[in-house]
Amino acid sequence: MIPVNTTILQTAGWQEQLRDMVRDGKELLQLLQLDPDAMPDISAALRQFPLRVPRHFVGKMRPGDWRDPLLLQVLPQKAENDLQPGFVDDPLGERHANPAPGLIHKYHGRVLMITTPACAVHCRYCFRRNFPYQDNNPSRAHWQQALDYISARPDIGEVILSGGDPLSASDDYLAELIARIAAIPHVHTLRLHSRLPVVLPARVTDSLLQVLTQHRMQTVLVIHSNHPNELDQDTATALQNLRRAGITLLNQSVLLKGINDDADTLATLSERLFQCHTLPYYLHLLDKVRGAGHFECSQQRAQQLRESLLVRLPGYLVPRLVREEAGASSKTPIAI
Ligand SMILES: *Cc1c(COP(=O)(O)O)cnc(C)c1O
Ligand code: SF4
């Protein structure tokens, strides 16, 4: 095997897969041998937040099952149009913590950069589903403002590349951005929040591993997986390669009604993550974003689940149960 050629093939592979995503509800259902005519009218939900899902992720769904936990995360529902009290457009108050285009600074010592507004998958519960991405599309021309802001604040030691999904950007784009961040001496940690190793594991190429590791900072990658079925062999291999490259791997999940709100699923998820060299980090209570009310799980139920995880699993496999509150100085832990 000639490694260089493998890399070229893999690189072509992920971009092709990104272009070739499923964007049509009917096609998604047909791929899963479900009857599109049985689906209620979801056109209003689609106008709000279009359907996007990579074929690799569709391949992890169970054909013929309307309640498949992966399908439910991406299939638009009529219920998204139900107005629910308390569910709003900007539940985290990010618009008020946006000091430069594409930069969010809410917590001490770390800032979040919206690297690209694009995501490889559209999760229906996403808290940014109504966020003005178009105003936060930090093209290269805009980076300077964000970088100047970080340079002027020596207490910012960690830069988090988020999105959208930062790994939906090209290697060249990421390499240039990372080099400019690394040029700020007080930044010691680079963190990425990405769902791509889960929904499109071909993204983890040799060339990406180089981009993520050939700089002087510590690198942390926080993936986003909600259900053990998402962690198939391809994703396990991608994570293993990231780990071998020296990247610290963590996972965040969102607690979702009907998808992962039972102790068996969550315990299996933690164990499977560990097999994939990844530690559970956060289990988020749903952000109250307009259109996601049907995913909500009560806080009482969340606390019961966390209690049973504490009893069943070693401490390092129990994620921190948190909610995000606008104006708070960190994620807010939920006590049992
Ligand atoms: C979640 C988040 C962070 C990171 O918080 P940690 O608790 O360090 O994981 C940073 N900035 C923003 C805006 C966030 O939402
Ligand atoms: S991958 Fe993350 S940012 Fe993208 S749609 Fe899903 S939850 Fe939202």
Image (cartoon, rainbow, N blue to C red):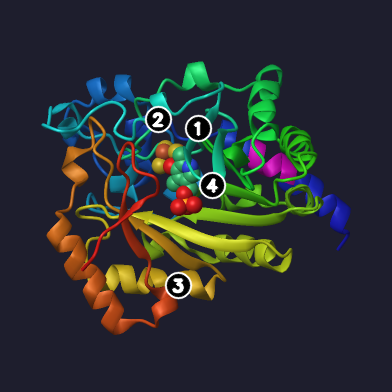
- Can I make out residue 53 in this image? no
Amino acid at pointer 3: Arg
Give left or right: position of 224 versus 88.
Answer: right
Q: Of the residues under marks 4 and 1, which one precedes in the sequence?
A: 1
From the image, tell me which residue sits under label 2: 94
From the image, tell me which residue sits under label 4: 194
Q: Is mark 3 within 8 Å of ligand 2?
A: no
Task: Say if mark 2 contacts mark 3, CB within 8 Å.
Answer: no
Label at residue 212:
none
Amino acid at pointer 4: Ser
Quadrant placement of the N terminus: bottom right
Give left or right: position of 281 versus 179.
Answer: left
Residue 259 position (above or below residue 23): below
Amino acid at pointer 1: Ile
Estimate the x, y position of residue 146 in percent, counting from the top left: 63, 27
Q: Is mark 1 within 8 Å of ligand 1?
A: yes
Spatial CA distance of label 4 from label 1 is 17 Å
Task: Say if mark 2 contacts mark 1, CB within 8 Å.
Answer: yes
Q: SS of the residue at dot 3? A: helix
From the image, tell me which residue sits under label 1: 104
From the image, tell me which residue sits under label 3: 272
Q: Is mark 4 within 8 Å of ligand 2?
A: yes
Q: Of the residues under marks 2 and 1, which one precedes in the sequence?
A: 2
User: Is disc 1 surrounded by few (<14), some (14 to 19) or many (20+) residues within 10 Å?
Assistant: many
Q: Nearer the viewer, mark 2 or mark 4?
A: 2
Q: Is mark 2 within 8 Å of ligand 1?
A: yes
Give left or right: position of 264 versus 17.
Answer: left
Q: Residue at x 67, y 41 (%)?
A: 154
